[in-house]
Image: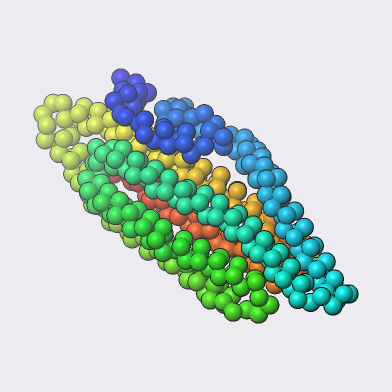
Amino acid sequence: MSIESIVNEQLAAMDMRKIEELFNLSGSRSVFGDTSPGEIIRSILKGDPIFSLHDIVAAISNQFMKEIHISIMLGVQLVIICIIIGLLKNFSTSFSEETVSKLGVIVCSCCVMVLCLKSFMDIYQVCSESVNTMTVTMQALLPILVPLLISMGGFSSGGILNPFIVGAITIFNSFLQKFIMPAVYLSCIFILVNSLTERDYVKKLALLIRGIAVYGIGLAVTLFSGLTLVQGLVTKTADGMLAKTAKYSVDNFVPIVGGFAADSLDLIISCTTIIKNGIGIFGLIILLTLLIIPLVKILAVALIFKITAVVIEPIGNKTVSDCVNEVGNTVITLAIILFLCALMFMIFLSIIIGIGGGSLWK
């Protein structure tokens, strides 16, 4: 029996509808094209490229330009409002109507604050939904990958890594949704409120909260990824010893057919490894899509905020310009959080992919 036929039989017996639905839901087809775990595995067997780098770069570039085009309207609105603020200030100097001018400036500043807050809330929602979908993706992949890992002889790895990674994902998602992202949201509110005055009342507090959020997410990713990596290395060594012992026993103590059975076992393990790695790569593609598409949108909006802040500084209120610039920095903070979250999940998957039959049974 050939390796391809064994792989096809094992694939037919597996239920992968959940991760294929997540693939469609994540919008992966727009970046990586129409693929599936079976096609990835067949590409691995044939030695063909899994996807085209040129097509991926072109898709990301098109998506970025599309988001820039959508976000330009926000920048234009902010510039128009800041031009009005500049005109009101000039009118107050020319006609000595300082009270009316200040009232107009406050009203225009409130309009800037509303526009920035609306845009930030949209980005915040995109980031939150992407993190939740990443969590669901990992929870759907583990029940498929861990049994494959155990069937290859990774008893220690499957028994220890599965509950550890599940617990890490649950704790990390709760920590992110209940503490880190609300902290970033609160810092944005403080920055917008501070823009209504000429003095900095809560700006430093906002920057402190934002900094704590970034350090907190970085520490959590380092902690969970490091612990998982150490667990993976330790259990991989233990599984290797168990697998070698089992293979030696079958080869030497089973009369007549022991060598044939050991070779057949090697073939099955190799096929299972290919399937596990193919599904793992499919999961990485989903995670990359859940990172790339929101990240492109977030960076496009952040770029518009940054450019708008540069444009309105000479023509409007410097406080408003600083506010728009800091909102852009806060949006970039969300991009950092999303990137670190995806990085941690990809490290988890890479560790599982790295524990394979070849390394266990040689």
Give above or below for 215 relative to 221. Answer: below
In the image, taking residue 212 as reference, residue 295 lies left or right, namely right
Query: Observer-nearest residue: 46 or 301?
Result: 301
Which part of the image, by quadrant, shows the C terminus? top left
| Rendered image quadrant of residue 113 | bottom right
Q: Total of numbered circles in the picture? A: 0
Q: Which percent across, then down, holds residue 153? A: 23, 41
Q: Which percent across, then down, holds residue 126? A: 52, 49
Residue in the picture at 47% in, 36% down? 25
Residue 324 visible somewhere in the drawing: no
In the image, taking residue 307 as reference, residue 252 lies left or right, namely left
Query: Observer-nearest residue: 127 or 285?
Result: 127
| Rendered image quadrant of residue 82 | bottom right
* Colour pattern: rainbow
Residue 352 visible somewhere in the drawing: yes
Q: Which percent across, then down, holds residue 176? A: 41, 59
Which part of the image, by quadrant, shows the N terminus? top left
